[in-house]
Amino acid sequence: MATAVFYVLDPRKYEDGQISVLKGIKSKNIVYVTVNKPYSHLESVLKRRGIDAGNIFFIDCISRYSGISIKEGGRCIFVSNPQDLTAISIAISVALKNMSGEKAVVLDSVNTLRTFNEDQVVGRFLNFLINRMRALDVYTVLFELEAPLNEMIRQTESIADRVEVVR
């Protein structure tokens, strides 16, 4: 059965928290949706931190928006911007379709999605994503910076199977 875990991370230890979670799911094929950092930067961080990214397919939602030079192909799909939630959903589906074995989807980060989209829109997107991944038997990880919880986050936490606060 697929599980959806909502990780609330201390901003001062955000990267450490991410790395810890990724090491815990390293046996799965991972679709990593990055709304926070460009794919090229994230890949170098993972390498520096000792994580083999060979089983990770990236969906980069920030490079094009930021005007960063990109090279299409390889292990990454570049989405135009973090507001294009439909394109993000399609990219996740395409990436998962090309994977076999146990799978996981990691979304980094809910906070950044909320910066680019209204809370209600993000709430509906997360509800759809979590339930779609359950239907596909895909383990789901959502990262959120620790902050005062608003109503949208409370609703998302209620959809997740587990909420873990990492300090």
Image: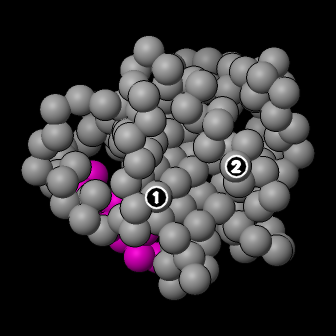
Can you give x and y, in whole percent of width and height, for residue 148 in the image?
16, 32
For label 2, count other residues whose C-alpha is less than 10 Å away and answer few (under 14), some (14-19) or many (20+): few
Say whether residue 112 is left or right of residue 30.
left
Q: Residue at x 40, y 20 (%)?
A: 11
Amino acid under disc 1: Val
Q: Which residue is mark 2?
A: 24
Disc 1 + disc 2, Cβ < 8 Å: no
| Magenta stretch encompasses residue 128 | yes
For label 1, count other residues whose C-alpha is less than 10 Å away and answer few (under 14), some (14-19) or many (20+): many
Res 34 quadrant in image: top right
Residue 63, relative to residue 165: is it above or below?
above
Can you give x and y, in whole percent of width and height, for residue 131 in the image?
41, 76
Q: What stretch of residues is rendered in magenta?
A: 122-132
Q: Which mark is residue 130?
A: none
In this view, the residue in front, 103 or 148, is 148
Q: CA distance from mark 1 to mark 2?
A: 12 Å
Q: Which residue is mark 1?
A: 5
Q: Residue at x 53, y 62 (%)?
A: 140
Res 163 quadrant in image: bottom left
Q: How is the image coloured?
A: one colour
Per the picture, the main secondary structure of the magenta-coloured stretch is helix
